[in-house]
Amino acid sequence: MLSLEVLTSENRCVLPMTDPTVGGEHRTTRRGVLKAAGATSAGAAAATLLSTGAVAEPESPTETDAEPTPSAVGSGGAFPQSVASGDPTPSGAVVWTRLDPELGALTDDDLFLQVTPAPDRATPNDAADFAGGTTYTVSTPVAAHDYTVSADLDGELDADRFYFYRFVYGDRAASPVGRLRTLPAPDASPDRLSLAVSSCNRYEHGYYGGFARIAEEDVDYHVSLGDFLYEYAGEGSQPGRDIQLPSGKSVAHTLADFRALHRTYRADDLLQAAMERHTFIHTWDDHEVVNNRWWNDEADAPDTRSHPFGGDFGRMRELYASGIAGMLEYLPLRVDYDDPGEDYGPDNTAQDYFGLYRSFRFGDLTELFMTDERLYRSRPPEGPDGERRDVAVPPSRDQDALDRTMLGTEQYRWFLDGGPNPDGLPNTDGVTGTDAQWKLHGNEVLCAALRTTGAGPASVYLNYDAWDGYEAERDLLMGRLARDEVENYVTLTGDMHTYIAGYLKQDYKDPEQSEYAGGERVGVEFMTPGVTSDNLGAAGGLPADETEDAIDESVQAQNPHIEWFNSSRWGYTVVDMTRSALTYTAYEVDRADDSADADKRLLRAYRVPAGEYELQEFRSPPLDETVGDLVAASVAGRDTDPDDDGSTTTRADGDGTGIPDPVERASDVDGGV
C-alpha cells in the first residue's frame, strides 16, 4: 500500500533579489511620475524605513467637494502596489493603497479617494467613470506606515452593490481602478453567491497566473485561507523570483523584513489584477509570521521550532508584533486591534491586542465564519520519544488530550454559539444559531482525518499540525454539529497545497468509516490547492513514477471519507451557492507561466444538494499523468492544451441549478449527475 512521506521546509540561502516588474501597458511609469514631481535623481530622497511606530488602522474618509484632475491616470508608478479592497460590510468596505516613497518624500499633496457605483457586474475596471461620483480626503501616507493607507467606507455605500474606486494624489497621478462589493443587508434573501478561494502563494515557488485567472472569474468576493505570503528569503524556483530581506537573514526577523516581503508580493501585476477586481476576505495561517507556530501556555507567549527566536519568548513576542503590523499595513482588514506600541510583554500579549476571527453574512443565504487557528492553539502533540511533533510520526501520546485546543475557549464558543464581530459587521449567532442556509467555515488547516499507512489503530496521521493533532476538540465540535442537527455545513480549507473533497464525521477511528460505526456525516470539506507553493509532489512526498489517479485511489483506501485527493497540481477553486445546491469547482493553473494567459484546466466539480451531505461528482476527467512529469513541468513550463469547454467558464447559470453552464455541458457529455 502506498505510503506518503512528509518533507519539512528548508531554509534557502539568501541571494540578491530581482526587482519585481511593476505596471503594464496601462500604467504610467514610476520614473515618469517622479520626473513630473521635480525629482532630479531617483535616489536623491529615498525613504529609509526605520520607524516601528503605531500601525495605521483603517480611517474614516471625509467627503469633499474637491475635483482632482490627475495628469497621470492608472499610475502604477505613483502607486507601485496598486489598490485593494477587503472585509466588506452592508454599507462599505476597507480600501487600500500605497504611495511611492520617493514621491511621498518629495511632495506634500493631498490624497483623495474617488468612489462611484459600477453600472453592472460585467463592466471592466478601466471603463469606470468617476464623473458624478463621490470624492473623499484621506490622510497622506507617511514613512512611519511604509506609505500605506487604508480607508474604511463603512456607512458610506449601499448594500449589495459593486463600486469602482481609485486614489488620486493631488493633481499628479491617479491609481489603477479597483472594484469593491458591499455585503447584502443582513435580512436580504439573495438567490446566489459565488466565491473564488485561494491559499498558499509562495513567491519563490512560481508565478501568479492563478491570480490572473481569479481576476477573470465572475465571482462576488475572493476568500483567502492563509499563507498569503511566506516569511522566507532565498533563491526562487523560477527566474526572477528571488527574495532578499533587509536583515540579510533567510527568514523574517524584523518589521522591515515583513514590509519588504509584502512589497515584493504585492508588486506582482498578476496578483494586483485579482486584488483590483475582487473584494478580499482573508484569514492568516502560519507563514504570515512564522512556520508551524502555536501558543505556549506556560510562558503565555507564541512559540515555534521553525525560527531562531523559538523558545526566546521576548523575541517571539516582538516577531509577532512585527508580523501583525506588516499584515495590517498591507492588507485591507477589519479586525479588533489595540495597538500595543512597544508594550507587548507578558501583560499585553497578541491574544490581548489582536483579534482576527470574524464572520460575514450574505443575507440569509450564507454566513462565512473566518477563524484564527494559530493564535490560540496549544503546543504540538507529544511523540513517543517525548518530543513535540507537528508532522507525520507514529501515533502521538496526547493528540487527543482534552486540555488541548485549536480555537481557544473564547473563539470556540463564538464559533458555535455566536458573539461580537468587529465594528461594521453584524454580530453572529454562530454556526448552530445562524438562520443562513449555508454555513461556511473559513478553515486554515485540514479538519478531516488523513492517514497515510495501514488502517484504523495501525494507521499514522499525515500532519499533526492540522486538526488531526487536536482530536478531542475536533470530536467535540463535530459532535455538537450532529446534536444540534446543523444542516449545510461546509468547511473551506487551505494549508496543504492540495485539492481534497471529503466528508466531516464525528469519529474517524473506525476502519470502515461506516455511517453508523464511524458516526454520521456532519458536513463536507473542500480544500483549495496552493496557487504556487510546493505541494507533496514537488516536495518529494509522493512517488514520482505513480500517476495521480493511483495516488488518489490509495488515499481513499486508507481514508474512506475522502472522495478526491490531488497534491500534484496548483490553482484555485470556486464555490457557488444557490438555494438548491453548493458547487465546488477546482481549477489547475500553470505556475511556471508568468502571464495572464497561463493555462487553466478544470479538474473536478462537485455538487452538494441543500439539506444533504452528499458529494455528487459531475466533472472528473482522467488525471493519469505521473507526479514526476507534473512537477518537472511546473518548473520548466510546458505546452499543453487546456481542457475542453469545461476548462473555462463565465460562471453563467442559465437554468438556475447551481451548476455553471459550461460545467453542465461537460457533465452531460460525461454522464454526470
Image: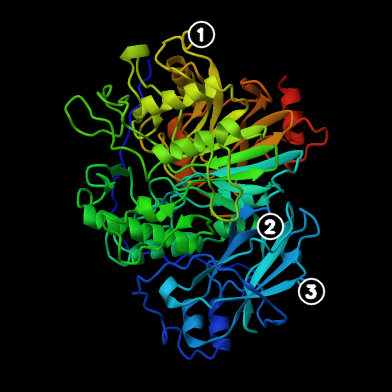
Q: Mark 2 points at which residue?
A: 91
- Between the residue at mark 2 and the residue at mark 3, the CA separation in whole angstroms equals 21 Å
Q: Counting other residues with Cα less than 10 Å from the Cα at mark 1, is it few (<14), some (14-19), or many (20 or more)?
A: few
Where's residue 399, x and y in %? 31, 26
The answer to whether one can see residue 478 in this image is yes
Q: Which numbered disc covers residue 516?
A: 1
Between disc 2 and disc 3, the foreground one is 2
Q: Where is residue 347 in the image (x, y as percent from the top left)?
A: 28, 55
The residue mark sitting in front, 3 or 1, is 1
Looking at this view, is 530 or 134 the one in front? 134
- Badge 3 crowding class, 10 Å Cα cut-off, few under 14, some 14 to 19, many 20 or more, is few
Q: Are marks 3 and 1 in contact (CB under 8 Å)?
A: no
Reading the image, the residue beneath label 3 is 131
Q: How far apart are marks 3 and 1 (CA)?
A: 63 Å
Residue 597 point in image, percent of width and height: 63, 51
Q: Where is residue 287 in the image (x, y as percent from the top left)?
A: 38, 49
Q: In which quarter of the image is residue 114?
A: bottom right
Between 590 and 214, which is closer to the camera in this rendering? Answer: 214
Q: Which of marks 3 and 1 is nearer the N terminus?
A: 3
Residue shown at 34% from the left, 17% from the top: 459
